[in-house]
Amino acid sequence: MSAENPIIYDDDWIIANWQAIRNWKQLQEAYNSSHSSQIGYTTFKAHCNMKLGLNFMYTQEQEEWLKENFPKLGRIATTQQFNKQFGTSKTVHAIKVHCVCMGLKVTNDRRSMTAIENTGRYHPVGTIVLGSHDEPYVKTEEGWKRLKEIVCHRDKGKVVIHLDGNPANCDPDNLMAVTRAVLIKMSKNRFWSEEKEITRTGVCWCELSEAIREKGGLPVKEGKP
């Protein structure tokens, strides 16, 4: 076909049949036969890959797993559990696009029944999702908040840190509110540790150092030392 007469594809037919056939050559031949067309294999496959986002990079077992879990788990949790289950490194976007191509869409009925982490509009209060670096966020009546800031009381101007360095561990014993000055000093002195008590000791040292600095340093005794 020339540029003046572009090929017009029946995308609905392709999407409805590609999963059942699962072979590009057979799919192209079946398409040409049912539409009385003569589209070449390479041209047809390129349209399916680039325009429709269709591919056979997922096994039948993986696709059955996605049908069972998406969109029940939501985009992020689905991707994380999929990669853990099959030892892959798929991105959230790749999983979402493939699921949509399979017809797995998030409907309003599903949103009202299930906590989906695609948009905050349909999350019930109390829903917990994982943000960047696996840090938990919780849906409140005031909007999304970091779980650690709800669990650990903090005064204005302070930030909450995870003593073991694990942002997913929001156990109260693992959280501590510190000033930004202490946070900077902790990083500058490399006092962070996976051991909670070591990190806690580093925080105490930084807080003591800041208190001494604010008072103008240690008092100087008169006379000989």
Image: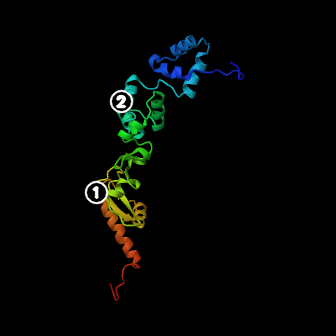
Locate residue 183 relative to residue 24 in the image: left or right.
left
Q: Nearer the viewer, residue 67 or 95?
A: 67
Q: What residue type is labelled 1?
A: Pro
Above or below residue 58? Residue 139 is: below
Q: Position of residue 6 (x, y in %)?
A: 67, 22
Q: How far apart are marks 2 and 1 (CA)?
A: 35 Å
Q: Is residue 22 left or right of residue 153?
A: right
Q: Which amino acid does label 2 sit on?
A: Glu
Instruction: Specify whether residue 162 is in view.
Output: no
Name the mark on residue 68.
Answer: 2
Q: Is residue 176 above or below residue 207?
A: above
- Number of callouts in the render? 2
Residue in view at x 40 percent, y 26 percent: 63
Compared with 80, 39 (above or below) is above
For the N terminus, give its image quadrant: top right
Q: Residues within 10 Å of mark 1 (few under 14, many from 20)?
A: few
Closest to the observer: 192 or 126?
Answer: 126
Which image quadrant is residue 122 in?
top left
SS for callout 2 = helix
Q: Is residue 161 visible?
A: yes
Which badge, 2 or 1, is on the more N-terminal residue?
A: 2
Q: Quick check: 110 above or below 58?
A: below
Residue at image point 36% right, 46% down: 124
- Quadrant of residue 4 in the image? top right
The residue under label 1 is 172
Nearer to me, 102 or 125: 125
Quadrant where the C terminus sits is bottom left
- Judged from the image, the secondary structure of the residue bearing numbered disc 1 is helix
Q: Quadrant of residue 111?
A: top left
How are the colours assigned in the image? rainbow
